Image (cartoon, grey):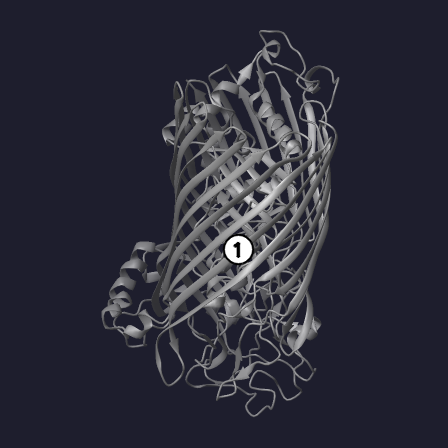
Amino acid sequence: MGNWNKRTALLLGGGMVALIAQGQAWAATPREDAVVAAASDIPGSDTDDQTRDGDTIVVTGQRAAIKTVQDEQVKNASLVTIVSGEELRAQPQQNLADLLTRLPGVSSSVDQSRNAASTGEAQYLSIRGLDTAYNAYELDGVRLAQTDARTRAISMNLLSPFALSEVRVDKAPTAAQDGDAIAGVIDLRTASPFDFGAHHFQIRAQGQIAGRAAARDQDPWGGTIALETAQRFGNFGIYASGYYGKKNIFSESVAIHKDYTKQNGNLPGAVRDNLANAVPVGVEWNIFQNKIERFGGTVNLEWKGDSTDLYARTTYGEYRLKDWMDQTAARSVGLTAGQTNPNTGNPLGSNYDAAGYLALYGLGGTNYFRTEHSNQRLFTTKIGGESRLGDLTLDYNGAYSRGATSYPLRIQAKWGSPTYIGVNATGPATYKLITGLADRTNPQVVLTDDARNTITNLDNFAQAYTTAQFEDSWESKLEGRLDGTWRFGDRGLSSIQAGGKYEASKRYSNSLGDDGALEYDFTATDPNITKLTSVPGKRLNGFMNDVQVPFYIPDHAWIEAQNAKLSLSKLASIDPVLLEQNRLDGKEHRASGYVLANFAFGGLTITPGLRYEHNWFQGRYWQDNGTTSGFTTSARSYDEWLPSLIASYRPSENTVYRFSVRKSYSRPAFDLLLGPTSVSRDDSGKITSIFVPNPNLDTVEAWNVDTSIEHKGAGTDLFSASLYYKRLNHVMFSTGSTNAAGDLNVWTSPNSQLSPDGVEIETLDTSGKGSVYGVELFARYSLKGLPGMLDGLGFQGNITLQRADATVYVSNAYRRQRMPQAPQVMFNTELFWTHGGFNAALNYAYTGNKLYDLRSSQPDTYVQPVSTMNAILSYTVNQHLTAGVSVQNLLDSHSYWATAGVGKALLSVDRKGGYVEVGRTYMLNLSYAF
């Protein structure tokens, strides 16, 4: 720890040289042409931009950017929240999903089934926490191609804030925008060369230290570098930016081993019916080593003429994750030769004694290794223009987007101790495995000294297997659009707008998802078998809580080499069916048109509209009917008519009242419509469930009502309040998380079928109805007239309170359930200070608990509240240079906490996430504008 403290002092106390040597960067400062100015040079300074001497440096770029987007927000026709790129880049995070949760009603989520929560970054972004399929995601107005194989979720991992001029969150879009946006539209807009001076160049840098990694003697270093330029030559301009970032994250988690079981087997009902009777059967401790690389760039070309503007906007982003998970566990394992279970013949099963109480025999210590490496890529390009022909304005563009995600190699390997049954290694078992939950985030297995010695002697851990899997998916999308607006005047019918859009997409996904397809199992006499401590590696020097089985971290390169020799070598002789049975080739087309009118009567504007969308999809996939198998094709088309009405009243230029009612819909995820039948099996290979996609699913439809008030005060002061209500039909409980299996979140109809061996075949039901209603409040205020160093102090905050639930059919009964991923409480608050060249902020964000997935006999999984506090301080040295420091997760809070049931008493099982801590991240920021 001594070396860690010295390095921290060096970096944070004056380590500019160390930062530049890292060659990594961050955008935490305003753009060149709005970085600093004398107060006397600020046109229209308001009361919070208080006048100072002309020689005093005043940070105005971020504040000016906030004021600009606030003015635009108040003037906008619909209810929209806008945040400037300057404000985003002033925060310590680099991940857009985390950055945008500062906005009212915007929440993020992460899926720990692929270890994603261990990175400390959110993956998905949603308005009001509704399923990602209820949101439309755009980059410069282009619908983003999907990168996920099984959902319509758009991962924010590979998008960066560096080239963004603003982000618009439209919660009540007009008929001119895509109709599959029940929650709203999130539009990321890149910068224009005309946003800057004639010749602009800026470099931003950030150095990072991951505190938890440093404490565990792992690689803690990281950072980012970003370059940006804008050049104008008369009517023509070019904007270009590029960035590269690399970071190391080390995190830790605790979870329960497998599902809960009954303590008293005689009590009726399922485990979920009596949580006081639910007990775990072991504990798993995990460490995660993550190496993240981000890089990409934007090139925007623009030409402005007297009557025509033309543009070309292109963005590319890539996100590469190397994720290594090491797990140690004290858990239930099977008895071995010569060991017997005294519960034989019990009608409740071999895990219960004669009185009907749990008597679980067979304790083992295990060391498990898994990689979850992934690569994500996204490319978008858009070419178009605007022509002004008198009273007629035409907007036209063509665009292309392609997104891809691959899991190139998922390795799993396991070592285990001898099975412990008591003092005697053979014969009837006498030791009962009991797991205590007295500490809800630190469960412990009750161990005798002899049991502890057995499962902590890593020299006796023998390798059980090694196996590999892989996965790949992509989508490419083409779209073309033409809009026309005819203006008549300022009163009465002021304009008519109409347009059309056509988009066509192709998608592909495939995986070798069977754990056993390439599995190599070791036998006791196998010459390839290894003991754990004979593998190159090292022990971990600490853990967040009491770990009962110590960590030995095998060398990653050694495991990969062994897997290539024993597991991947089987690929050449694998059954070809296994390489085809998860393949899905799909097409999806949509043609849409709309018309809307704008009426103006003084301060009152009314905009009625009607949108029509025609959808068509087709898929080719492998289908196994039990006796025959092969590729099959399904296709379907459907139409949506979507009326809307938006009204606003402006008694003054700083105040607006809005009301809107509109119809919208959500297209089901592609894997729910099409794809192979999914068969789930237990550890013994027995089929437990069969899930069949349904191409005849109805779309989720919603009637949306929104009303709001916004008032713009002096400077950047702003207050807003809104109420909203959504009435949903044809509801499905599908969650937008990475590769979440549909059969855990979307449930069968009352008329489900049974397979010949009695296993229920789940088909999808869209008869559910639901509702969403809530209130959102936002306020930003700068304190006036404060003396001395207190000058420049202010605060902002927002809170969203809502209910989102629906009726669905689960396990032979209808349930009224909270909707997945939709929290009931979200709030953010920030204390900011701008004085002279100083700019500081302390912000705190909180997201309440939310449903993760539905279970049948087990308790539903919930994600408990998550909060984080960040601190930021920067100083503008002169008109060129700004430097600062920031700390992410100042309070060292957990990043993820999943439980069985809505309460906190029962920690979730491992594949649902458990309790995860990532620790703090320390950053040194530098920006220089030439």
Instruction: Name the residue at 65% across, 24% down.
Output: 833
Instruction: Name the residue at 40% across, 84% down.
Output: 626
Q: Amino acid at mark 1?
A: Glu
Picture coordinates of residue 888, whole percent (x, y): 55, 38
Q: Quadrant of residue 840?
A: top right
Q: From this viewpoint, is residue 891 visible?
A: no
Tell me the residue that label 1 is attached to. 613
Q: Quadrant of the C terminus?
A: top left
Picture coordinates of residue 687, whole percent (x, y): 47, 81
Picture coordinates of residue 331, whole percent (x, y): 51, 70
Classify residue 114 as left or right of residue 446. Answer: left
**Farthest residue in the top direction?**
54
Instruction: Name the residue at 49% across, 85% down.
Output: 755
Q: Is residue 762 above or below residue 344?
A: above
Q: From this viewpoint, is residue 823 visible?
A: yes
Q: Residues within 10 Å of mark 1 (few under 14, many from 20)?
A: many
Picture coordinates of residue 814, whole percent (x, y): 68, 73
Total numbered badges shown on the rendered structure: 1
- Disc 1 is placed on an element classified as strand
The one of 200 and 478 positioned closer to us in this rendering: 478
Classify residue 772 as left or right of residue 362. Answer: right
